[in-house]
């Protein structure tokens, strides 16, 4: 073969590899409203930045006549590229080749780029669209999954790992996404479950659709497995690009700082009058968030799950910051099992990747009830407490209104190594609300009064006394638990100045194999 | 006809139940007649106490365990709006027959000393209201039916 022909052979092979499972299958993929593995990578990465690895890999299976059917690349496209100029590693399942099923070599390709990502300290993004294990390969396929899982586990907290689900993801293959930091699902075409509707029907008799069992909306609102739902694949991949702009490349770096024209001393007069006069009435915490962040931007995580708490990323003077905020307009802003888990995982993510956390507090307490207790609210609530207490990142807390009881402690209080704890003048920091406290403190005196009118008057008086003494931030401030009481409209400036002064903070936890967070 | 004597929060209710159709029954509570819809549990007899448990109001949504054949829903596609959290009914700004738009306030529940707005998740007509002001509700209790 002449050199010229050798070059032609290479070009031909490349063209063949890019065809994946062939034109017919690509058409079928498009007909379902899905993009191909390569189209997805092109949308995700900076234009022309993708460098593919292992394009010529094929499987080694000889069972069931598999040796006669081979495709270059073996059903997964892997490689590296950039997003906004920053290095990332990517793999993308190719559904047109054996339904994107995972073989031993398929797994090897993924492991190779994960190893590179760890060595280089760059994020990994996996785009999932796979029928599951390649059955013809038997346990080789299972071993392949486990090789990936092990790398997911070792990379956890070292590099950001993001999973995008744009097709089926069932059985064992759900566990790789589950081990990563963020999961995005497309609204149509994607589903995740451990066992599918057929098995569910056979075992339990329950009739359930694929969407109801493991669709994007279920996982985004009920199970909390999905952090983001993408209306379509294009917008989903754009969201991932956006998400990465808030994250560092790895646990030893800081997130990129962007230029900020939004004045840091910007006063927001509307905040002075945002809170309703009646402390029992709700308001939208999102208004507070968008009033204080750079340009009012907020990148929400888990928007549809456990809505009584808000988590997400924003920037303060260009610095990426995590925000955790109670939402009084949803479920009274309570902490329950779901909201505790949601916030705990987010705080731990921020701590692992050196992203400071701002906590906005307006919490009436933990949700009471047998359902919560039976569900283990004690350990779930402890997760959030643990997450805040172990976090060594800069922590600023602003208490807007209610901060009662155990929930006060959990929401990044001073003693959990909070760096700056501010309160608005409307804050009420106490062990419990006035009426509950009076029942306990004055119970004997109340029971002695027989005239119901006098009794009511006595309770009212005592409640007022208690409110004046405790339903304010000054008792906490007098003890130094609140560093300063601030005017609401100055919140942006105070928060930014506080974060600036603590950006060089060094705090270390005792050395140990690892802690034992109540999982 | 089946008769029950039920005590709820110290109050006694005399209830008699006559099944009219599959999933629909005529019940009489302290002399006042109501027509109720219910879902039947797989193995339970027709008049399990759980049906009558919430019979103080004029419609009943019985336990959610799906019966094998879905019960007929005579009143179109009314869907009950459930309480997302325990508390007491503070205010009901809507009335039966009223048209509501998605995002409108349906019920305000006071919970943890907070007024909590229950909003309509879609446009519809209020078919029935199962609660009254001051009543305590648990998480998952039906508040009203929206068609």
Image (cartoon, rainbow, N blue to C red):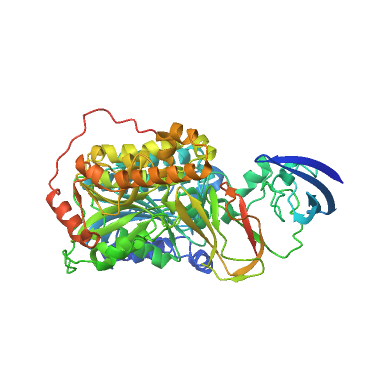
Give the camera-side residue of A468 and A1: A468
Q: Position of residue A206 (x, y in %)?
A: 67, 46
Q: Residue at x 21, y 29 (%)?
A: A511
For this view, does B16 lie left or right of residue A67? right
Give the camera-side residue of B142 and B33: B33
Give the camera-side residue of A247 and A125: A247
For this view, does B90 lie left or right of residue A288? right
Q: Position of residue A147 (x, y in %)?
A: 38, 39
For this view, does A314 lie left or right of residue B51? left
Q: Quadrant of residue A236?
A: bottom left
Residue A176 visible in this rendered orientation of the protein: no
For this view, does A349 lie left or right of residue B80? left
Residue A290 visible in this rendered orientation of the protein: yes
Q: Residue at x 22, y 58 (%)?
A: A487
In the rendered image, the vertical position of residue A151 relative to residue A233, given as above or below: above
Q: Position of residue A438 (x, y in %)?
A: 41, 39
Q: What is the number of callouts on the image? A: 0
Q: Residue at x 50, y 39 (%)?
A: A372
Give the camera-side residue of A277 and A318: A277
Q: Residue at x 73, y 50 (%)?
A: B39
Q: Of all residues shown, which one is farthest toward the right?
A: B1
Quadrant assignment for the C terminus of chain A: top left
């Amino acid at each position: 073969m002449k050199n010229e022909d050798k070059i032609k052979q290479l070009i031909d092979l490349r063209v063949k590899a890019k065809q994946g499972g062939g034109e017919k299958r690509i058409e079928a993929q498009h007909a379902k409203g899905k993009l191909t593995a390569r189209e997805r990578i092109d949308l995700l990465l900076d234009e022309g930045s993708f460098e593919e690895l292992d394009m010529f890999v094929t499987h080694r299976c000889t069972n069931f006549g598999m040796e006669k059917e081979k495709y270059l690349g073996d059903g997964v496209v892997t490689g590296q590229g950039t997003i906004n100029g920053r290095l990332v590693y990517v793999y993308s399942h190719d559904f047109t080749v054996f339904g994107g099923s995972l073989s031993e070599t398929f797994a090897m390709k993924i492991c190779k780029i994960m190893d590179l990502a760890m060595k280089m300290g760059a994020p990994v993004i996996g785009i999932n669209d796979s029928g599951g294990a390649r059955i013809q390969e038997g346990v080789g396929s299972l071993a392949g999954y486990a090789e990936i899982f092990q790398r997911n586990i070792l990379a956890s907290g070292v590099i950001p790992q993001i999973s995008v689900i744009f097709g089926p993801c069932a059985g064992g293959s759900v566990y790789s996404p589950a081990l990563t930091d963020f999961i995005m699902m497309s609204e149509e075409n994607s589903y995740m479950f451990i066992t599918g509707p057929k098995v569910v029907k056979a075992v339990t008799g329950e009739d359930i659709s694929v969407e109801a069992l493991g669709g994007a909306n279920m996982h985004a609102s009920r199970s909390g497995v999905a952090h983001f739902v993408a209306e379509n694949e294009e917008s989903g991949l754009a969201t991932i690009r956006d998400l990465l702009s808030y994250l560092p490349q790895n646990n030893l770096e800081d997130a990129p700082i962007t230029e900020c024209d939004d004045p840091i001393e910007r006063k927001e007069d509307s905040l002075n009058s945002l809170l309703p006069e009646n402390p029992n009435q709700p308001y939208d915490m999102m208004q507070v968030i968008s009033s204080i962040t750079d340009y009012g931007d907020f990148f929400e995580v888990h928007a549809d799950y456990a809505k009584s708490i808000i988590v997400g990323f924003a920037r303060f003077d260009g610095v990426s910051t995590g925000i955790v905020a109670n939402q009084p307009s949803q479920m009274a802003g309570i902490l329950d099992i779901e909201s505790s888990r949601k916030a705990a995982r987010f705080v731990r993510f921020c701590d692992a990747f050196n992203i400071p956390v701002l906590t906005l507090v307006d919490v009436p307490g933990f949700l009471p009830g047998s359902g919560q207790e039976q569900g283990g609210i004690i350990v779930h609530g402890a997760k959030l407490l643990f997450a805040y207490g172990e976090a060594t990142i800069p922590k600023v807390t602003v208490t807007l209104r209610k901060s009662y009881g155990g929930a006060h402690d959990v929401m990044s209080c001073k003693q959990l190594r909070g760096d700056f704890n501010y309160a608005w003048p409307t804050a009420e920091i106490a062990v419990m609300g006035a009426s509950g406290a009076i029942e306990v403190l004055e119970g004997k005196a109340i029971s002695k009064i027989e005239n119901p009118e006098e009794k009511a008057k006595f309770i009212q008086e005592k409640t007022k006394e208690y409110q004046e003494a405790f339903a304010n931030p000054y008792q906490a401030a007098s003890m130094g638990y609140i560093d300063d009481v601030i005017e609401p409209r100055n919140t942006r400036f105070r928060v930014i100045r506080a974060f600036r002064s603590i950006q060089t903070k060094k705090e270390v936890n005792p050395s140990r194999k690892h802690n034992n967070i109540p999982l | 006809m089946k008769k029950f004597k039920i005590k709820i929060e110290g109050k006694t209710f005399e209830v008699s139940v006559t099944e009219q159709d599959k999933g629909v029954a005529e019940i009489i509570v302290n002399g006042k007649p109501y027509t109720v819809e219910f879902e039947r549990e797989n193995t339970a007899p027709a008049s399990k106490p759980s049906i009558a448990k919430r019979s103080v109001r004029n419609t009943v949504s019985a336990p959610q365990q799906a019966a094998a054949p879905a019960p007929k829903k005579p009143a179109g596609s009314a869907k009950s709006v459930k309480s997302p959290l325990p508390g007491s009914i503070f205010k009901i700004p809507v009335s039966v027959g009223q048209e509501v738009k998605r995002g409108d306030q349906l019920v305000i529940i006071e919970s943890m000393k907070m007024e909590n707005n229950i909003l309509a998740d879609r446009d519809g007509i209020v078919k029935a209201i199962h609660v009254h002001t001051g009543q305590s509700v648990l998480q998952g209790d039906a508040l009203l039916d929206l068609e």
